[in-house]
Amino acid sequence: MAGAQEKLSLDDYLVWENAQPERHEFYRGEAFAMEGARRVHGVASGNLAVALKLALLGRPCQVFSQSLKVQVADEAVFYPDVFVTCHADDLRTEMVFRHPVLIGEVLSDSTQGFERSLKFAMYRRIAELREYVLIDPDSRSVEVFVRNERGLFELHDFTGLAEMELASVQLRIPLTEVFSGLEPTPAG
């Protein structure tokens, strides 16, 4: 039996991760390999990224997707599917972002528990974060958690509606755009 693995510091993780062919997320000293994404995941996250990019043209914010890291304190580094930042420090960095106003994650059966619990708990620690978007391409559900004036996140469920509203970037996106290119899930 192998002995306990030594915990990585954040700096050691970043050096190690940048040399890896695969992506790994970091949480409290441990690195976790990310699983491969399904086609529906790539289509839904790409659709969201494109809608955000078009809406942000000419504005001092940028949208990023999948291969860039968001750091939460010294405890965690994640690869969100899509995020938007308007912070000057983030707009100058090349690899690690710390101040997103919006984070979007596309759910799968194997990741949704993590996305809804621990990952969301960590993301809530980002002071600038205003919205956390969860998209389930299989059930066609869209949930947006919006930080209210008391600093608490409230659920806005857009499932079954014509569009979703993303107040942090003053945008309404038709759900047909979010799910464009995805075949309906057969019933039963």
Image (cartoon, helix red, strand yellow):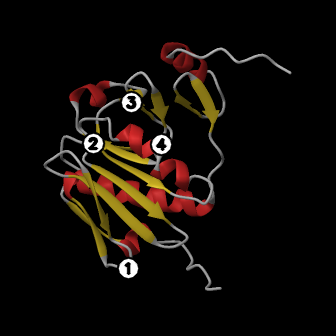
Q: Are marks 4 and 2 in contact (CB under 8 Å)?
A: no
Instruction: Tell me which label, 2 or 3, sits earlier in the chain.
Output: 3
Q: Which tag, 4 or 1, sits closer to the chain's start?
A: 4
Location of mark 2 (residue) = 129
Question: In the image, is 56 to the left or to the right of 138?
Answer: left
Q: Which residue is disc 3 drawn over? A: 72
Question: Could you give the CA–CA distance between mark 2 and mark 3, rounded to whole angstroms?
Answer: 11 Å
Residue 130 in view of the camera: yes
How far apart are the two marked residues, 4 and 1, measured between alpha carbons? 27 Å
Q: Please say if the residues under marks 1 and 3 sit with CB atoms less than 8 Å apart.
A: no
* Marking on residue 118: 4
| Label pair 2/3, CB-CB below 8 angstroms | no
Instruction: Classify residue 139 as left or right of residue 143.
Output: right
Where the C terminus falls, by quadrant?
Answer: bottom right
Above or below 1: residue 182: below
Q: Which numbered disc, 4 or 2, marks the residue that appears first in the sequence?
A: 4
Asked whether 41 or 188 is in front, the reply is 188
Residue on which disc 1 sits: 160
State the image coordinates of residue 31 (x, y, percent, origin top left). 60, 28
- Amino acid residing under circle 3: Val
Q: Nearer the viewer, mark 4 or mark 2?
A: 4
- Three-letter code, disc 1: Gly
